Every structure is written in C-alpha cells, then in structure tokens.
Amino acid sequence: MYDPANSALVVRTGGRYLLTGRILLAYNTNPTGDRSLQIRVNGGARALDVQDTATVPGTGSASQTVSAILQLDAGDVISLYALQRTGTEAVSMATAFGDVTVAPQLTAELLVPDA
C-alpha cells in the first residue's frame, strides 16, 4: 500500500476505509495564525482539521489528528498534507519525551471491502 516514490498510500482493494493522519509540530510560540492537517485522496482534500494557534498553549509543540471514513477505489492515492500559517517555522519531525522522534503518520484501515 505504501508508495515511497510519492510518500503516499495507494489503495489496492476498493472499499470503505478508516483514514487517520497525525502530526506533532515543534515550533516557536506565536499566538496568531492557524495550522491545518488534511487527508487528501487523489490530490483533493477529503478530511480537514484546523487548529487556531491562539487556543493552543505556548508549549513549543502541538499534536494534531484528522480522520474520516471514506469509500475508496483501487488505485486511489491517499496523502497527508500539513499547512501552518503562524509566521514562524514549524518542524514536523518533532522530539517528544526528551529523545523520541515522532514522524507524521498516515494510516488506512480497510473496514468493508467492495463486494
């Protein structure tokens, strides 16, 4: 399912899927702006989560999750897209718990295959 050439997942079996994307961002604190995390299918946004950075404590890191249950066809390409508009840099491979590097995650679980 994973396609390293595109850093994406390619559906092999059509059906209903539970898609989940997660990211941990390390950033310089800034009380303005927003961050969004999207699950895209064939380049189009199909699920979206937006965080208003004014409501996130100024800890220097923030986690974000987006999920959806979608009907997908064989050959569909699933990708995770992150955008942050805070005016400061953010790093998506953040270190948590002092020494553990956490990379962005995208999972696709087949719930019901096509008949």
Image (cartoon, rainbow, N blue to C red):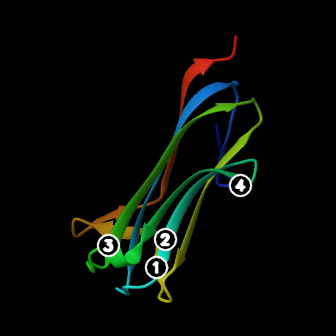
Identity, as a three-letter code, of the amino acid under mark 1 = Ala
Q: Nearer the viewer, residue 31 or 16?
A: 31
Q: Which mark is residue 111?
A: none
Label 3: state its secondary structure: loop
* Residue placed under numbered mark 1 in the picture: 90
> Label 2: how many residues lie within 10 Å, few (<14), some (14-19) or many (20+)?
some
User: Which callout, 2 or 4, points at the residue further toward the start of the chain?
Assistant: 4
Residue picked out by circle 2: 35
Residue in the picture at 63% in, 18% down: 113
Which numbered mark, 2 or 4, is in the foreground of this view? 2
Residue at mark 1 to residue at mark 2: CA–CA distance: 10 Å
Question: Can you identify the residue that label 3 sits on?
Answer: 56
Q: CA distance from mark 4 to mark 1?
A: 22 Å
Foreground: disc 1 or disc 3? 3
Above or below, comparing residue 41 to residue 13 in the picture: below
Q: Earlier in the sequence, mark 4 or mark 1?
A: 4
Residue 87 location (% of width, % of height) = 50, 89
Secondary structure at badge 4 equals loop
Of pointers 3 and 2, the one earlier in the residue sequence: 2
**Can you tell which of label 3 and label 4 is closer to the viewer?**
3
